[in-house]
Amino acid sequence: MSVTHGSFSREQRWLFPVACLLAVLLVATVFPFSSLWRQQTELDATSNAIALLHQQSANLQRQAQATSSRSAALALARQQYQLVLPGQSLIQILPGAGAGSSSALSGDPGFQPLVSPQNAQLGGLVAPTVATPHAGANFLVRFVRTLEFWR
């Protein structure tokens, strides 16, 4: 038999304090752990970024060591900057007039010969149009042609 005080039974009176204790316990544990979880994911992302930077730094150091030798510096100066040692001369061999195939491979349009506009091949991109004078046409015909333009 249960003892009642007012309209609540003994079990009901214990249920409220237990629920409050559980709520306080959840709030006291969930918020710090969720904050720790968020901070851990940020730490993981930051440590991954640092590892990537260390890898890039190691690659750059290897490149610097590879180009720090005298022969590598000379090769780099000759290939990229057309520099030579004192007493040497630089000779560049340009393609001749008959070497059209090598200039076409370079992709530089400056090496291509000029084409007159009448002989230009547009590859079907632009249809040739013939200008027709509309001086004799009335206003209605010109208006309809203008509307056809906007279609």
Image (cartoon, rainbow, N blue to C red):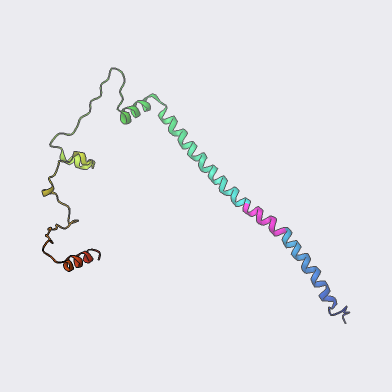
Given residues 109 and 25, the one toward you in this image is 109
Residue found 69% across the figure and 55% down from its top: 32
Given residues 40 and 4, the one toward you in this image is 4
Rendered image quadrant of residue 131: bottom left
Vertical side of 14 occupied by 97: above or below: above
Image location of residue 14, percent across then percent down: 83, 72
Image location of residue 98, percent across then percent down: 12, 37
Vertical side of 45 occupied by 143: above or below: below
Residue found 18% across the figure and 68% down from its top: 140
- Which segment did they paint magenta? 29-38
Residue found 15% across the figure and 37% down from its top: 99
Rendered image quadrant of residue 22: bottom right
Q: Is residue 31 magenta?
A: yes
Image location of residue 39, percent across then percent down: 63, 51
Name, please, the residue furthest toward the bottom.
1
Kindly report the secondary structure that dominates the magenta region of the rendered protein. Answer: helix
Instruction: Judge from the rendering whether residue 29 lies leftward or rightward of residue 56; answer left or right.
Output: right
Image location of residue 61, percent across then percent down: 47, 33
* Number of marks drawn: 0
Instruction: Judge from the rendering whether residue 105 lies leftward or rightward of residue 70; answer left or right.
Output: left
Q: Is residue 5 magenta?
A: no
Instruction: Judge from the rendering whether residue 34 lies leftward or rightward of residue 5; answer left or right.
Output: left
Quick one: quadrant of the C terminus?
Answer: bottom left
Given residues 86 and 142, the one toward you in this image is 142
Given residues 128 and 36, the one toward you in this image is 128
Rendered image quadrant of residue 150: bottom left
Residue found 51% across the figure and 40% down from its top: 53
Quick one: quadrant of the N terminus?
Answer: bottom right
Instruction: Judge from the rendering whether residue 139 lies leftward or rightward of residue 76; answer left or right.
Output: left
